[in-house]
């Protein structure tokens, strides 16, 4: 994610409370920024174990796999 200072940052390295603040900032009000931030926050709410996360991606992202772990992704 490109930050306002021109540097790039991995979204997973940004604290949840900072992501929540970013949602309200004009700098990050574009549709693209809002989607990325909201998707990351939703993903963090699911609280998958490492094994569940590995299994989700090991077998490919199947429709039934996503539904099993949460409908909030709307895939």
Image: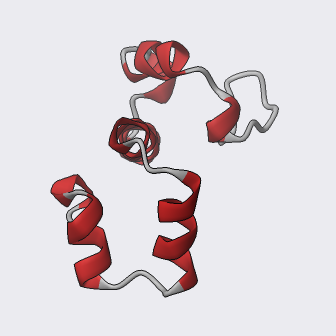
Q: Position of residue 43 (x, y in %)?
A: 40, 46
Q: Position of residue 40 (x, y in %)?
A: 45, 42
Closest to the observer: 17 or 29? 17
Tag count: 0
Tell whether 29 sits left or right of 15: left
Q: Residue at x 25, y 82 (%)?
A: 63
Is residue 13 shown above or below 57?
above
Percent across and percent down for residue 39 are: 38, 46
Question: In this rendering, is residue 50 above or below 3?
Answer: below
Q: Position of residue 41 (x, y in %)?
A: 40, 35
Camera-side residue of 45 and 7 = 45
Give the image's coloring scheme: secondary structure
Hey, which quadrant is residue 15 in on the image? top right
Residue 21, quarter of the rendered image: top left
Residue under the image location 23 percent in, 57 percent down? 70
- Is residue 15 visible in the rendered image? The answer is yes
Q: Is residue 75 visible?
A: no
Question: In which quadrant of the rendered image does the C terminus lie?
Answer: bottom left
Q: Residue furthest right?
A: 7
Q: Quadrant of residue 34?
A: top left
Q: Which residue is located at x 49 percent, y 87 percent? A: 59
- The vertical placement of 34 against 66, above or below, is above
Q: Is 12 placed left or right of 23 in the picture?
A: right
Query: Where does the N terminus fall, quadrant-wise?
Result: top right
Residue at the (45%, 46%) spot, across then down: 36
22 displayed left or right of 31:
right
Q: Indicate whether 29 appears above or below 37.
A: above
């Amino acid at each position: 994610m490109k930050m306002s200072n021109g540097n790039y940052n991995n979204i997973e390295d940004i604290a949840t409370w900072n992501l929540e603040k970013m949602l309200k900032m004009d700098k990050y009000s574009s549709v693209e920024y809002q989607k990325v931030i909201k998707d990351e926050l939703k993903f963090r709410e699911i609280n998958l174990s490492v094994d569940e996360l590995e299994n989700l991606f090991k077998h490919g992202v199947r429709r039934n796999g996503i539904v099993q772990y949460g409908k909030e992704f709307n895939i």
